[in-house]
Image (tube, coloured by chain):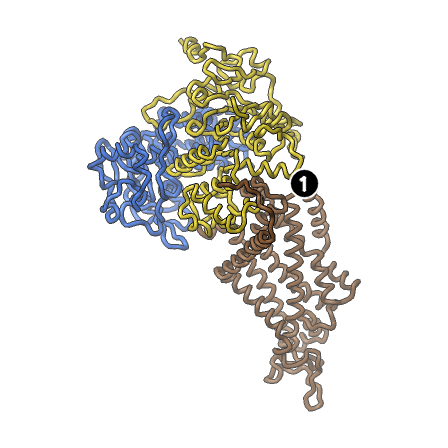
Chain colours: A blue, B yellow, C brown
Amino acid sequence: MSLLEVNDLKIYYKTSRGISKAVDGVSFAVDQGRSLGLVGESGCGKSTLVKGIIRVLAGNGVIAGGSVNFDGNDLTKMAESHIRQVRWKDLSLIPQAAMDSLNPVYPVIDSFLEILMLKGKLSRADAIQRAQELFTMVGLDTKRLRYYPHEFSGGMKQRAMIALALALSPKLVIADEPVTALDVIVQNQVLRVLKNLKKELGLTLVMITHDISVVAETCDDVAVMYAGKIIELGPVSRVLKHSMHPYTMGLANAFPNLKKTESTLISIEGSPPDLVDPPKGCRFAARCPFQIEACAHEEPSLVSVGDRHFAACHRLDEIAVLQAKAKEVDTWRKIPS
Amino acid sequence: MAENPIIEVRGLSKHFEARQHLFRKSSTGAGVLKAVDDVSFRIPKGHSLGIAGESGCGKTTTAKMLLKLYEPTSGSFLFNGKDITHLRAKEELKQFRKQAQLMFQNPFEALNPRFTIFRSLLEPLIVHDIGTKEERAAFIKQALEQVNLIPAENFFEKYPHQMSGGQLQRVVLARALIVDPIFLVADEPVSMLDVSVRAGVLNLMKTLTERLQLTTVYISHDLSLISYMCEQTAIMYLGKVVEIGDTMSVLQKPKHPYTQALLAAVPSPDPDEEPEEVLIKNHVPSPINMPNGCHFQDRCPYTEAICREKTPELRQAETGQIVACHMVTPFFDRKAEREEHVI
Amino acid sequence: MNTDVRMEQRPVQVAYRKAGFLAVLGKNLAGAFRFLKNDPFSMTGAVIYLFFILIALFAPLLAPYDPHEMIKHNGKLAFNQPPSAEHWLGTTNMGRDIFSQLVYGAKPAMMVGLTAAFFVVVVGTLVGLFAGYYKGRVDGVLMRVTDIAFGIPFEPFVIVLVAFLGPSVWNIVLAMGLLLWRDTARVIRSQVLTVRERSFVEAAKISGASDLRILFVQVAPNILPLSFLYGSLAMGWAILTEAAVSFLGFGDPAMMSWGFMLNDAYASQALSREAYWWIIPPGIFIMLTVMAGFYIGRGSEEILYPRLKNQ
C-alpha cells in the first residue's frame, strides 16, 4: 500500500462571490521512498491541495469530500488534537517562505530544541546532538546553530528549514516551492541536499513547484494540475517527454531551454477558468487548440495510458497526431472560442 | 561598427556608503559597497544585451544608472553619442526620459491601482505634451493594439486589479512604447508571470523591439531567458562584469569559472539529462570591503596566488567573448585539466 | 506611431489636463461613496453625520422656540418643566425650551466638526505627503514640527488659547486646526513612504513626470481615502472637544451648544433634581456624533487593504 493515498479530494473556499472549487476531485498516491512533483500555475490549487492534506486550510476553506489516507489513517477524519501529533512527527512541511519561518528573536538552535524536546521528547543534551546531526546532514556548519536567522543567507535558511522538517524523521516531507526565491547556484545546492537526503534516508517527498525543470531534476513522478484537477500524472520522464495532455505539451513549449536555443517559445493563450463557476466540460477546453465537441459538454476522466501514466483528455486515441501538431507554432495561434 | 552605439558606458561605477544606519555601525564598520565597479560596454542600435547574475551582483544598479535613476560615482555614460553622465538641465533630462523606458518586473505594482488603463497610458502623453485630446485617445488605442490587447476599447476603463498578470505586463509595455523611445530596459520582465503566458510576452517583446529598432537591455537571473532574447550577454559578479560577448559564445562556450557554474546550476527541463556538477564552493561573500584581487577568489575551484593579488582584466578569449580571469589563456580548457587532476 | 511631433501647448490642452485631475478626484469620491454603500457601519456613521448637518442647516425651521427665550405661560416663567406636548423635552431652570436648544446645538457642533475636519485633512495630508515623499531634510523639519504638536496637551491648549483670544467658536476651531492635523500627518507620511517605493511611482519618474506631478497625480489618490477617514475621525474628536470646552465654561456664550447645555444643567443642579430630560439628550447627541466618526473609521482596514475583502 502507498504511504500517501489521496482519493477524490475536494477542497472548497467560501468567497464573497460564491463557492470556489479550488481542488475538485483529485486522486493520487505516493509510495514509500518516492518523490512526487506537483506542477501547475498560480491558482491551479496545488498549494490548497497540500494545505488540505495537512489540514492547515485558511478559515474559509473546507474539505468537501474525499479522503487522504496516510500511513493507514484518514487525515480528513482525524481529530484536530490527533493530527497535531502527526504533523512534524510523521508528516512535515518545508514552507514556501522559509525566510520568515524562523523566529528572528531566537537563535536557530532554539527552534530545533523546541521541536525536538517538545514533540520528540528528547532530553536537552540529546536534542542538541540531534540538531548538530541535522545541520551536518544538510551541509551547514554546526557552529551556525547558535546564530540568529538574520545572520543566515537565503539558501542557508532554506537548508535550516529542511533540517528542521527532518528533525523527527518524518515518513513524508512536503516541500512548498522550496527553491522559488533562491538564486540558481543556491537553488542547485538546496535541490542537491534534498536529492541526497532522499537517497540516504529513503525520504518520501511531495514537492510543489511551478518550474518543470526543478521537477525534472528532483522528482520520480509528476502530477500536472490545472484549474483544481490533476490532468496528467505519471513518471517524470514519461509525462515530460511523451506528454499525453495538450496542457502539458503546451507547458513544454513555453519553457525556454538553454540547450535548444533555436526553438521558438509558444505560449498558451487565454487564462484559466473562474473556479467559482467552472465550465461543464474539460476545464482546459477554452485554451486548447485540439478542442472538439465533446470537450465542452463532458468532463474527461483521468485514465491509464500505460506504464503508471495517466491523462485526462477526450482525444487520447489520436495522441500521436496531437503530439506532432503541438510542436508547431501555428497550432497554438488561433483558438476556436 | 559603422554606426554610433546607442548605449556606451565606460568604467561605470556606483559605490554606496555602507554605514547608513546609526545603530549598525559596529557590525560592518565604515565601508564602501561597490554595487557596480568599473563596468564598460556598448550596445549598437537595435541590439540587445542581457545582464545576468545572482541577486546583489549589481545588475539592477547598472540598469538604474542606464535609466539615470542613479547618478554614477565615476565613469561615463554616452547615450546616442552624447555624454549624459551628468545631466544638469531639467529639459535635457526630460528629453532623455522620453527616449529611455523601463519594463518592470512586477506588473501588479507597476500601474497605479487607482488609475484606469486609459489614464495610465495617458499620463506619459500629458507629461511630454504629445498630441491633442483626440490624438491622444488614438495613440492609446494604437499602443494597446500594438501589444495585442484587442479590441483596445474594452481595456480603456479597466483597473489593474481587473486584469491578469500577462495582460498587465502588456499594458506596461504599451506604456513604455507610447512615448516612442529608442532604448528599453526590461528588468526581469516575466519572472512574476505564469509559465504559459511568459512566452507570449517574450515573443511580443521580441517582435516589437525588432520592428521598432529598439536598443534593449534585459536584466535577469534566468539564463535561458537571456539566451532566448539577447544577442549579447554580460555576466556580473559582485559589481563586476566577469564575462561579456555574443550570447552564443558566452552561454554555449563559457570561459569564466563563474559563468560555467551558473550554467551548470540551471536545471534542465529534460528529465533524462544528467545534471552537471557545480564546482564552486561557499556563499557569495559580503560585498563590503572586498579583498584585493579577483572577487571570485574564495569560491573559484582554480584559484592561484595571482588571483589574490591582482584584479583580472577583461581579455578576449579565443571563442570571441571577453573574460576577466587570470586563468583563461587561449587553448586552455580548465575543465579538461581538472578531469586530468581527478584521474 | 509618429510622436516626435511636439505640439504647442494650447488652451484646450490645459483645460483637458485640469479635467484629468478633477476626474481622478471625482473617481475617488465616487469610490469613497461606493465603499460607504458596501459597509453598513460606515454607512450608519455617514447617515448620522448627514442627519446632524441637516438639523444644523434647518435649525430655525425645526425648533419651536428661540433657544435663549425665557418662556412664560400666562405671564409666569415656565421653568423646570418635565417633557410635555408643548415642550417635548421640558424646560430649563430659566424656562428655556430644551428641544430647541438641542436643535440649535447641532450648528456649532457641525461648524466645529467640519472646519476642524477640513483643517486636519488639508494640513495633515500636505505635511504627510511632503514629508513622506521628499524624505531627508524636508521630512526631518516637518516631523519635528509634528513632534512638537504631539508634545502639546490638546485640551489644555484649547482652553488656554480660547482664554487668551476670547470665547468664540472660531477660536476653538483655530486651536484644533493648530494641533489635530498631527495624527493625520504621521499616518499619511508612513503610507506615502510605502506608496513612493512602489514601481508605478518609478514608472512615472521614468516617463519624465516632475516631483510635484508624481506627488499629486500618482501618490495622492492612493492616500486620499485615508485622509478622508482621518477627517471623519477628527470630526468626532472636534465635536467632543467643543463640548468639553463649553462644559468647562469656555464656550461661546452667544451660541447654544450641547456642551453649554450640559454646563448649564450641571451648574443649576439638574442632576440632583433628576431632570434627566435636560442632561441625557445632549449627552446622546454628543455620543452619536463621536460614534459616527468611529463607525466610518471601522472601514479603515478595508480602505487600506482592499485585497483583504476579496479573499
Looking at this view, is A120 or A327 the one in front?
A327
Q: In this view, does A15 lie to the left or right of C66?
A: left
In this view of the protein, can residue A83 be seen by the observer?
A: no
Residue B334 drawn at (x, y percent): 45, 12
Left or right placement of residue B314 versus residue C67 in this view: left
- Work out which residue is located at the far left of the displayed protein and give it: A317
> Is any part of residue A76 visible from this angle?
yes
- Between A71 and B147, the residue placed more toward the observer is B147
- Helix, strand, or loop for circle 1? helix
The residue shown at (33%, 41%) is A226
Which image quarter: residue B192? top left
Name which residue type carries label 1: Gly
Return the residue at label 1: C136
Q: Which residue occupies the extreme bottom position in the image?
A: C74
The answer to whether residue B281 is above or below residue B102 is above
Residue B248 placement (x, y as % from top left): 43, 22
Q: Where is residue B167 in the image (x, y as percent from the top left)?
A: 43, 43
Please identify the quarter of the rendering in which residue A32 is found.
top left
